[in-house]
Image (cartoon, rainbow, N blue to C red):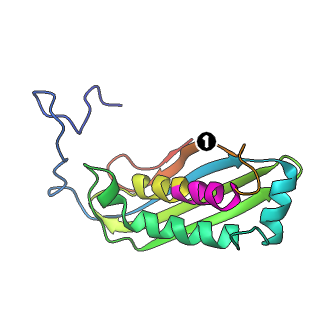
Amino acid sequence: MTDRLTHLDEQGDARMVDVGGKPVTERRAVARAVVRMSPETAKVVRAGDAPKGDVLGTARLAGVMAAKKTGDLIPLCHPIGLDHVDVEAAIDEDRGIVTLTATASVTARTGVEMEAMTAASVAALTVYDMVKGVERGVAIEEVVLLEKTGGRGGAWRR
């Protein structure tokens, strides 16, 4: 671990990291978001008959679209041409949990952790939006990076 934040210059001002000298490598990141709701709402999500329609299909699409816009959303994040983004959803009806797992990959000079985390975050927000008419108490409990590969730092796993 470095003792210096890479997005700060010597004066402590925010800056975009210069990745121009870094090698182009294959990079991949996986992130997860967990959404908690009542078991009854989770059943509505699984059935696909929420008032606003297909919750999980809409959340997957929103996550992919968000990943592609990460460079526009996070001020110092490099805009990159993604090779692939996927968002998978799993439902535990008994516990009232929807787990969204986003995977992003690229061949570039910079990683895709922020794209994977953005995809998972926006997918979770979309689940909330799609079911808030059914239940207001839905909570996004976690957004976390699970793993990354490629680049100077190599592989990392939570």
Q: Residue at horizontal 65%, vertical 73%? A: 57
Q: Is residue 73 left or right of residue 40?
A: left
Q: Nearer the viewer, residue 87 or 106?
A: 87
The main secondary structure of the magenta stretch is helix
> Crowdedness of circle 1 by 10 Å Cα count: few (<14), some, many (20+)?
some
The furthest residue to the left: 11
Residue 67 occupies quadrant: bottom left
31 w.r.t. 68: above or below: above
Q: Residue at x 32, y 71 (%)?
A: 81
Q: Is residue 107 above or below residue 8?
A: below
Horizontal relation, residue 32 to residue 74: left or right: right
In the orientation shown, which residue stands out farthest toward the front?
Answer: 133
Image check: 29 left or right of 25?
right
In the image, the segment drawn in magenta is 122-132
Task: Tell how many labels.
Answer: 1
Label 1 sits on residue? 142
Image location of residue 12, percent across then percent down = 16, 28
The percent position of residue 153, horizontal first and vertical second, equals 36, 46
The secondary element bearing badge 1 is classed as strand
What residue is at 57 percent from the left and 41 percent from the top? 158
Examine the structure image and report whether residue 40 is included in the region drawn in magenta: no
Compared to residue 58, the image places residue 96 above or below, namely: above
Badge 1 amino acid: Glu
Residue 53 image point, x, y percent: 70, 73
Q: Is residue 152 above or below residue 80?
A: above
| Position of residue 82 measured from the top left corner of the image (x, y, whole percent) | 38, 70
Q: Which corner quadrant holds the N terminus?
A: top left
Q: Residue at x 30, y 57 (%)?
A: 110
